[in-house]
Image: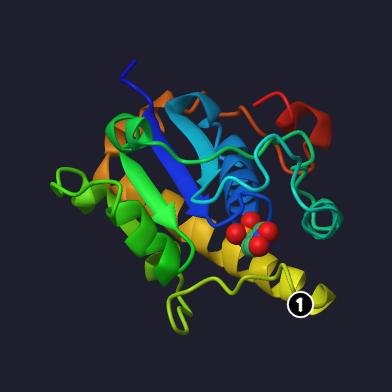
Amino acid sequence: MSMPVRILFVCLGNICRSPLAEGVFKDRLHAAGLSNAMDVDSAGTGSWHVGEAPDTRMQATSRARGVEIGHQKARQITCADLERFDHIFVMDKNNLSDVLSLDPDGLHHHKIRLFREFDPEPGDYQVPDPYYGGEDGFERVFDIADRTASMILRRLLEENPALADQAPGDDQAPGDDQASRDTD
Ligand code: 4NP
C-alpha cells in the first residue's frame, strides 16, 4: 500500500471553516472507502481557540447535514505542517498570505492553495467567515464545503489513480451510520 496523501485545511480560528472542511472531506473519503488512503487534518493561523471544539453553531449545522465534527480540537498551524502535508487548502486570502509567510524561502508554496479554487461555483475564491454573522452564514459555508470537498477528492484521485486501488470495494454503503464515521 502506498503512503497516505496528507491534506491540511486552514482557516483563522480552526473552529468554523477548516474543521468543517476536514469533516466533510473525511466524510467523502469514508463514503469512497478511502479513509486509510489519506491523512486529513485542519489548523488555524491564530491561537485564540487552541484546544477548543468547533463553534457550536458550526457543529449544529454540520450535524444537521450528516457530518459530525464535535470531536475535533482546534490547533495552530506550525512550520512543521508545511513539511508534513502534501496539500494545504486555505479558506481565504488572509489565510493564504499568513500561511505563505511561514515559508519565506518558498519551498512549499506549490502545496498551498485557496480551497475554493476547486469550487465549481468559486465566487471570489474565499470561504466567508461565518463567526460574526447569522445562522445562514454557517449554512452557506456548509454548501461551499459540500461542493468543494467532492471536487478536491475527485481531482486527487485523477492525479493519483493508485489511490483508488486502496478502496476495498464495498467498504461503504449508502446510509452508513454516523458512529462509524467518528472512528476515522
Ligand atoms: P474560522 O472562524 O476562522 O472559520 O474558525 C473564526 C473563528 C474565530 C474568530 C474568527 C474567525 N475569532 O476572531 O475569534
Front in this rendered view, residue 111 or 119: 111
Left or right position of 46 against 104: right
Q: Position of residue 98 (x, y in %)?
A: 37, 58
- Amino acid type at circle 1 is Gly
Vertical placement of 54 versus 180: above or below?
below
Vertical placement of 113 versus 52: above or below?
below
Left or right position of 56 against 118: right
Q: Position of residue 181 (x, y in %)?
A: 72, 32
Front in this rendered view, residue 33 or 43: 43
- Residue 116 in view here: no
Quarter of the figure with residue 12: bottom right
Q: Position of residue 102 (x, y in %)?
A: 30, 47
The residue carrying mark 1 is 133
Quarter of the figure with residue 37: top left
Element on which disc 1 rests: loop
Please name the residue shown 69% across and 35% down the image: 73
Please name the residue shown 43% across and 58% down the image: 90
